[in-house]
Image (tube, rainbow, N blue to C red):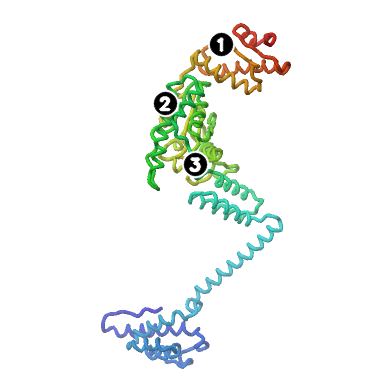
């Protein structure tokens, strides 16, 4: 609309020019109305010229507004400078949009034609896909339903919806569609919200550790202290107001360090059993690529998430006990530093927003109970070692080895070799002699291999005579385990 000039008092020339411009603007735009269509000038329509703004406004109002209210409102405006703006406001809703702004009308028509063309092409593509049996639209809708039912956080849901929309525009058999499906499968399968109920019985944890592990009293005491802090922190988290959380738990990740065969992995598994949490192991030995921890970006062929999110997928919950096995054997090459990538994983301040390069959306790792194992603390980078609470497992003494062999190793190996009850028996002297054969070995792997060798000899006898029994004593042990192959003697 034409804005009338608001000059200082006495500016009659500017006001008169503004009134004539307003009258001319009205005539240009009302010519498209049905009442005035075909008139090329005001005189042809029986109206005064626009050089007489007041008379033009009165005649135009009488022609276009038969109603009493509009006419009274215009009659109340004595000056033409008031009637013309009021007439503009009354006429604007009646003006056809193409006539009011031809450029906008042309742009609107072009946009409608483009949208119609896209619609026709999209329908033709869907018809071709139906003929080929590749109904991408139905697949995309199924993915949207799965995403909405998976309980994803807003950022992950938005990423999944965007990927489903991309999948809808791809040929179903293309390699890009396969990549999109893999991404959507990871989003749906990850445990974004599922938590496993946890047992808070510390005394029960003590009994389980004592039953499954002989000796190591100082180590078990330190583990129980760690579990006590963890359980108290979980209670504080549950009691915190909605939307807030207590500070991260003290201590962070526990690192069980000691020679091979001293029971580090089995202690971690016992911790998971004591709490009732799923146990997931991530083997880090020989890992040299940072992408193994934080995932590959989807621009690479065959990209996948890192081992951390893969372990969470296997656990099927947000709060497993996750064992970082052989953390001291991480390598380093031109593909980055995996030990540096683990710093974010093990930092309690950053675990709630861990971002994998493949997913590119935050995943909450704050509920995971982290345990690591290491053989050589000196091989670990100093920043990573400082992020861990180290518990050193001492070597086993002869008495502890004998007790563990009698209570755990022999029954377990007999079961693994499918021996019937009583098929293999070792005297106390035989067990002590078996321990002495291992020399100064700090762990139990050599001892367990010797027990497995005895079980194989018993299995051979049982297969020949189902009622046979192999009795191992201190006197015949060397003959049984002679590398040249001694005669086990007649079955007992």
| Secondary element at image label 3 | loop
Query: From the viewer's perspective, is 489 left or right of 215?
Result: right
Proximity of marks 1 and 2: CB atoms separated by less than 8 Å: no
Q: Which residue is mark 1?
A: 428
Q: Nearer the viewer, residue 17 or 234?
A: 234
The picture places residue 87, in percent across and down from the top left corner, at 40, 84
Q: Tell us which disc is closer to us: 1 or 3.
A: 1
Q: Residue furthest top?
A: 475
Name the quadrant containing residue 79: bottom left
Q: Which residue is mark 3?
A: 195
The picture places residue 125, in percent across and down from the top left corner, at 66, 60
| Secondary element at image label 2 | helix
Can residue 209 be seen in this snapshot?
yes
Query: From the viewer's perspective, is 133 left or right of 343?
Result: right
Residue visible at 52% across and 74% down in the picture: 105
Q: Is residue 24 above or below residue 338?
A: below
Measured in 3D between alpha carbons, the distance from the residue under mark 1 to the one under mark 2, in whole angstroms, is 32 Å
Q: Which residue is mark 2?
A: 222
The picture places residue 406, in percent across and down from the top left corner, at 55, 16
Residue neighbourhood size for the residue with mark 1, other residues' Cα within 10 Å, grouped as few (<14), some (14–19), many (≥20): some
| Secondary element at image label 1 | helix
Residue visible at 45% across and 88% down in the picture: 64
Proximity of marks 3 and 2: CB atoms separated by less than 8 Å: no
The earlier-in-sequence mark between 1 and 2 is 2
The picture places residue 383, in percent across and down from the top left corner, at 42, 31
């Amino acid at each position: 609309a034409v804005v009338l000039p608001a000059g200082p008092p006495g500016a009659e020339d500017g006001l008169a020019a503004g009134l004539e411009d307003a009258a001319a603007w009205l005539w240009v735009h009302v010519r498209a109305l049905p009442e005035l269509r075909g008139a090329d000038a005001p005189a042809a329509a029986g109206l005064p010229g626009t050089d007489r703004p007041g008379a033009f406004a009165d005649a135009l109002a009488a022609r276009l507004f038969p109603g009493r209210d509009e006419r009274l409102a215009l009659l109340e405006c004595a000056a033409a400078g008031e009637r013309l703006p009021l007439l503009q406001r009354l006429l604007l809703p009646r003006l056809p949009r193409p006539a009011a702004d031809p450029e906008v009308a042309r742009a609107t028509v072009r946009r409608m034609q483009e949208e119609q063309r896209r619609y026709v092409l999209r329908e033709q593509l869907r018809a071709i896909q139906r003929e080929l049996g590749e109904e991408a639209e139905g697949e995309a809708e199924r993915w949207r339903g799965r995403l909405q039912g998976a309980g994803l956080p807003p950022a992950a849901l938005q990423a999944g919806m965007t990927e489903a929309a991309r999948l809808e525009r791809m040929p179903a058999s293309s390699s890009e569609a396969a990549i999109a499906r893999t991404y959507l499968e990871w989003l749906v399968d990850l445990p974004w919200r599922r938590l496993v109920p946890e047992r808070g019985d510390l005394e029960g944890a003590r009994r389980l550790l004592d039953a499954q592990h002989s000796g190591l009293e100082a180590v078990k005491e330190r583990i129980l202290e760690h579990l006590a802090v963890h359980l108290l922190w979980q209670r504080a988290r549950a009691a915190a107001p909605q939307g807030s959380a207590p500070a991260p738990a003290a201590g962070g990740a526990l690192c069980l360090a000691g020679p091979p065969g001293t029971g580090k992995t089995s202690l971690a598994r016992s911790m998971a059993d004591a709490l009732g949490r799923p146990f997931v192991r991530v083997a880090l030995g020989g890992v040299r690529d940072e992408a193994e921890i934080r995932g590959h970006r989807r621009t690479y062929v065959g990209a996948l998430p890192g081992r951390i999110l893969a372990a969470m997928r296997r656990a099927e919950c947000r709060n497993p006990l996750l064992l970082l096995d052989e953390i001291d054997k991480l390598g380093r090459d031109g593909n980055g530093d995996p030990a540096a990538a683990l710093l974010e994983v093990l930092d309690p301040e950053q675990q709630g927003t861990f971002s994998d390069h493949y997913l590119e959306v935050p995943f909450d790792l704050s509920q995971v109970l982290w345990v690591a194992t290491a053989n050589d603390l000196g091989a670990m980078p100093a920043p990573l070692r400082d992020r861990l609470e180290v518990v050193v497992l001492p070597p086993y003494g002869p008495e502890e080895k004998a007790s563990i062999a009698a209570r755990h190793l022999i029954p377990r190996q007999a079961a693994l070799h499918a021996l019937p009850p009583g098929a293999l028996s070792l005297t106390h002297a035989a067990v002590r002699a078996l321990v002495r054969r291992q020399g100064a070995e700090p762990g139990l792997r050599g001892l367990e291999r010797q027990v497995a060798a005895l079980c194989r000899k018993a299995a051979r006898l049982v297969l020949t005579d189902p009622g046979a029994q192999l009795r191992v004593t201190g006197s015949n042990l060397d003959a049984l385990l002679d590398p040249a192959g001694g005669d086990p003697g007649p079955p007992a």
